[in-house]
Image: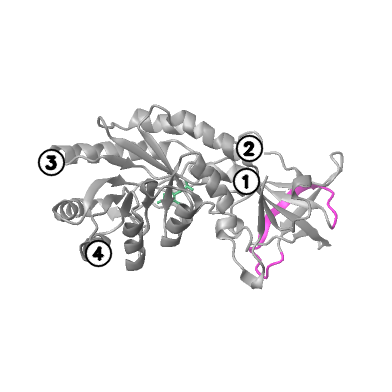
Amino acid sequence: MKIDLTLAEGLKTPLYYYDRSLLEATLKEINDCIKGTPIKVHYAIKANCNPKILKVIADAGLGADCVSGREISTAIKAGFQPDTICYAGVGKTDRELIGGMKAGIAYFNVESLEELEVLAGLAEEYGYKPNVCLRVNPNIDAHTHHYITTGLEENKFGIHLSMLGQAIDFTKKSSFLNLVGLHFHIGSQITITEPFKVLCEKINALQKEYAEKGIEFKIINVGGGLGIDYDNPDENPIPDFKGYFDTLLQNLKLKPGQELHCELGRSVVAQCGALISKVTYVKKGVDRQFIILDAGMNDLMRPALYGAHHKIENLTAPKDAAIECYDVVGPICESSDTFGKDEKLPITKRGDLIALRSAGAYGESMASTYNIRTLPESVLV
Ligand SMILES: *Cc1c(COP(=O)(O)O)cnc(C)c1O
């Protein structure tokens, strides 16, 4: 990604800066990889729901993966066709379930027996027959941060394997639900193939078990989770989609006519975004010096929330400037408001512009107004 500051002139910092050409190249890579395969990709819009970004993704023909009622309406407004939208979440309210049926979404990823019963009741009352994928908790360790692991039994997500038979029976017997498939999502920022292979094996075993009982699924949805390279955004601007899709296609035993759905979020948008911030102070401490930015944890929450690290660059310092060691922090009244410790950066001055790289996913969409700050602005260049 190239950051051309002349294009962001006149805009206020902190600023989310998005590179349209990298986003389009990423989408083209995805579309090239899935051409001629049974794969359909649904973009997980919680990763970045900026309308300008959503429109580019909808125009590329991806479907949408939503986790709230307002994500569904936002996706439709941005140009996603309702029948390409799937909807997951452990706590869908009655209003959200009804809204999804009214909008005509492709299917619900149902996460519990309790939700199935409520959805069936509402479908009867309102005269719909929604498509249902059952979200299975496959009890797989994705070897990622425990806050973003979702496929373990101890997590709140999905239907426990021991209750899946009951959920399938209920859905098949209901005149108001249409069982179309199984759904899985084991976590996020997964950078090794092993967990995806284990997932494929679990899915194969389940398919075999249910095929013996005469139950077939039209859709297998493996969720998202493909990780990106936060340390080397310039060397790896586009994730290894080919490797990821090949892992799925080689390890899954798909039936003829069966569709394979993926819900990619981070890997689609992370590298095309940077949070650009201005240095408010360079503060001398005892044994250390702090770069204090005008961006804080309310603008980019990942470091404070799960110790994530975004590559930090000084965009204005001369290329040949001497290197010094800094702690890079925000202005918020929390010590977790820290973007980097002992960062080696060119000598930095008040007024310099700093980029926090790979901030296109779970950056702007997680921003808050904590400390009654304004939300960051954005530009798609
Ligand atoms: C968050 C989420 C995704 C996307 O995960 P990424 O790691 O961003 O690819 C996909 N499916 C579901 C159900 C999710 O909650």
Give the alpha-carbon distance from disc 2 to disc 4, as whole Å. Answer: 44 Å
Give the alpha-carbon distance from disc 1 to disc 3, as whole Å. Answer: 46 Å
Give the alpha-carbon distance from disc 4 to disc 1, as whole Å. Answer: 44 Å
Let me know if residue 179 appears in the view. yes
Q: Position of residue 348 (x, y in %)?
A: 83, 52
Q: Residue at x 62, y 70 (%)?
A: 370
Q: Residue 3 is drawn in which quadrant?
A: top right
Establish whether ligand 1 lies closer than 8 Å to the Cβ of label 4. Answer: no
Residue 21: mark in rendering: 2
Q: Secondary structure at mark 3?
A: loop
Q: Residue at x 26, y 32 (%)?
A: 257
Q: Quadrant of the N terminus?
A: top right
Q: Which residue is mark 4?
A: 126
User: Measured along the vertical axis of the image, is residue 250 above or below residue 167?
Assistant: above
- Give, as a single range, the part of the protein colored magenta: 331-350
Q: Position of residue 368 (x, y in %)?
A: 59, 65
Establish whether ligand 1 lies closer than 8 Å to the Cβ of label 3. Answer: no
Q: Quadrant of the C terminus?
A: top right
Of circles 3 and 2, the one toward us is 2
The magenta stretch spans residue 307:
no
Q: Which residue is mark 3?
A: 213
Of circles 2 and 4, the one toward us is 4
Of circles 2 and 1, the one toward us is 2
User: Measured along the vertical axis of the image, is residue 316 above or below residue 306?
Assistant: above
In this view, the residue in front, 40 or 203, is 40
